[in-house]
Amino acid sequence: MSGERDLDTLRREMAPQLHPETFVYCSFPDFRIPPGLEPICTFREAEGVTAIVEKAQAEGSAVPYVFESHLITLTVHSALDAVGFIATLAGRLADADIPCNVVAGYHHDHLFVPTRHSQQALKVLASISAPPRPPARPAV
């Protein structure tokens, strides 16, 4: 299955799911992830490997970290070449002063938002996926 490309369908069916764990970002300049860490995501950069891990794992391994966040998975199967979906979400989250870091998986998009903003982020996403209200009828 190739995933959904239609922006209206993506917005309507995104069905965001908040994960309860707190995730953090770690950087490993030597390109080696220490034992005991099971990253949910890694990215290889010129400066080293960035790993997103559960906060408890980072603390248990005494690894420095930044950006305590909650993960929101958009459960709609979005196509990797869908145009405008993430831009729409990021724009609305930015309007609400909510930072987000996006990871695109093969099947779903994933948003990492600061823990203190996760409930508000869900409300913003729900407002995007809600059907538009019909115009008010004038009083007779």
Image (cartoon, rainbow, N blue to C red):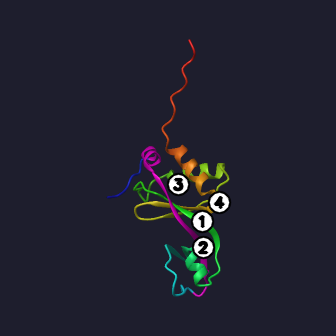
Between residue 103 and residue 46, name the one nearer to us. Answer: 103
Q: Which residue is mark 4?
A: 116
Bounds of the magenta segment? 7-30
**Which structural element holds mark 4?**
helix
Residue 87 screen position, x and y as percent: 55, 52
Compute the Cα span from label 4 to label 3.
Answer: 21 Å
User: Dot 1: what SS?
Assistant: strand
When the figure is inspected, residue 135 is found, relative to residue 76, above or below; the finding is: above
* Label 3: few (<14), some (14–19) or many (≥20) C-alpha neighbours in 10 Å: some
Question: Image point 46% across, 47% down: which residue?
Answer: 7
Q: Secondary structure at mark 2?
A: strand
Q: Nearer the viewer, residue 24 or 93?
A: 24
> Closer to the camera: disc 2 or disc 1?
1
- The x, y position of residue 21, in whole percent, is 53, 67
Q: Quadrant of the N terminus?
A: bottom left
Q: Tag 3 or tag 4, which sits nearer the N-term? A: 3
Q: Is residue 86 above or below residue 43?
A: above
Which of the two discs, 1 and 4, labels the residue nearer the N terminus?
1
Q: Amino acid at mark 4?
A: Arg
- Mark closer to the observer (3, 1): 1
CA distance for labels 4 and 2: 16 Å
Residue under numbered circle 1: 69
- Depth check, mark 4 against mark 3: the one in front is 4
Q: Amino acid at mark 2?
A: Tyr
Q: Is residue 43 magenta?
A: no
Q: Contact (CB < 8 A) between labels 2 and 1?
A: yes
Which of the two discs, 3 and 1, labels the residue nearer the N terminus?
1
